[in-house]
Amino acid sequence: MQIILQNTGGKPIYEQITEQMKAQILSGVIPAGEQLPSIRTLAKDLRVSVITTKRAYEELEREGFVETMQGRGTYVSHQDTEQVREEHLRRIEQKLLEAVEIAKSAGISEQEMCEALHLLFGGDER
């Protein structure tokens, strides 16, 4: 598991940890059933507060990505394929919203955006 934190950009550290761990779980880099580092170990490795890593783990648990077993540790949950699909769709929608905002500010039409998306999916030019 590799987590790279950035102090610039305004995104809270716990969110950066949560998003990167989710991405690694969804992609299979961190497989289901794998034990995660303890909150204290991760905090030490990342040089952040224990409160920050605790919040990230709580967020992951609330969203069903990990399970914490009292006295045993935190483990990656087995992912429901529908949950994985929904998470991917949520992330895609977030990125597309950013792209739409940029397009609107640059005066790029919806048709031009659709054509660009079609090309990116490997379609032939219209």
Image (spheres, rainbow, N blue to C red):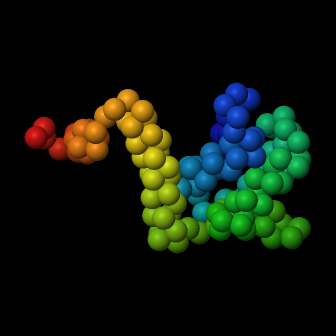
Left or right: where does residue 25 sit relative to residue 94? right
Count of residue discs:
0
Residue 38 horizontal/vertical position (percent): 83, 53
* Residue at image point 45% right, 64% down: 85
* Left or right: 72 in relation to 83: right
Q: Nearer the viewer, residue 83 or 66?
A: 83
The picture places residue 84, in percent across and down from the top left corner, at 50, 63
Q: Residue drawn at (45%, 47%), measured in percent from left and top?
A: 97
Q: Residue at x 84, y 66 (%)?
A: 72
Q: Quadrant of the N terminus?
A: top right
**In front of the other: 104 or 79:** 104
Which residue is located at x 73 percent, y 59 percent? 59
From this view, report whether residue 19 is shown above or below residue 31.
above
Residue 11, picture quadrant = top right
User: Which image quadrant is residue 34 in?
Assistant: bottom right
Q: Position of residue 2 (x, y in %)?
A: 65, 39
On-image quarter of the C terminus = top left
The percent position of residue 32, horizontal first and vertical second, equals 60, 63
Whether residue 57 is visible, yes or no, is yes
Q: Residue furthest left?
A: 126
